Image: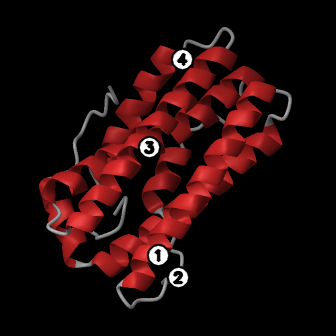
Amino acid sequence: MLGLKLPTDLRWAHMAERDLHALLTDHAWCEHKAAANALSLINRYPQHTEMVDELARIAQEEIAHFGQVLQKVVARGWTLGPERKDDYVNEVLDFVRKEGSAEERLVDRLLFAAMIEARSCERFKLLTETMKDEDLRTFYRDLMVSEANHYAVFIGFARQYGGRVDVDARWKAFLEHEAGVVARYGEAPTMHG
């Protein structure tokens, strides 16, 4: 369904489980950024009422996920660490068109969001298959379903509002670009590290 060209190496999941504090802290901030991205799309495209309504729901869900991850951090006796720069996300974002028609730019922003959700979904699935911690396995299974739904929403709105843009061709280009990006990661116990 997701179409990702390069699966996450199993070694990443084992590394992440060995440093749950780093994983959970980074994951919390990823949820925070996902909420901010949904709000940013609302700010840029308020004329698309149906999309705005759905993005408001996604932003609420993402900030709720932030709170849930924070609870996992605190339950383990840790504090939330500082936000870090996410080089993976920034490299995927570099592929988003800054020029072109309004439709092309909107499609790219939506496909960027879909790509981040797709990779997160794939990584959550891997964590559900490898983690020894039953609580976290269940937690990541629930989040995996949520990320898959968000991915579908973003792809759907790209198709709905894409006009003359060949969304499928552009999605394939995003998948190729992302495969080149993600190949350079997997060395850190962070969501995209």
* Inter-mark Cα distance, 1 to 2: 16 Å
Badge 3 local density, few (<14 within 10 Å), some, or many (20+)? many
Residue labelled with disc 2: 82
Disc 4 residue type? Val
Q: Earlier in the sequence, mark 3 or mark 4?
A: 3
Disc 3 residue type? Glu
Badge 1 local density, few (<14 within 10 Å), some, or many (20+)? some
Where in the figure is residue 146, as x and y percent of width and height?
Answer: 45, 43
* Inter-mark Cα distance, 3 to 4: 20 Å
Q: Quadrant of residue 72?
A: bottom left
Q: Is residue 168 above or below residue 29?
A: above
Q: Secondary structure at mark 1?
A: helix
Badge 2 local density, few (<14 within 10 Å), some, or many (20+)? few
Residue labelled with disc 3: 147
Q: Which mark is residue 167?
A: 4
Q: Residue at x 51, y 60 (%)?
A: 65
Q: Secondary structure at mark 3?
A: helix
Residue labelled with disc 1: 71
Q: Secondary structure at mark 4?
A: helix
Q: Nearer the viewer, mark 1 or mark 2?
A: 1
Where in the figure is residue 169, as x and y percent of width and height?
Answer: 46, 16
Q: Earlier in the sequence, mark 4 or mark 2?
A: 2
Q: Nearer the viewer, residue 172 or 54?
A: 54
Q: Which mark is residue 62?
A: none
* Inter-mark Cα distance, 4 to 2: 36 Å
Q: Nearer the viewer, residue 98 or 187?
A: 187
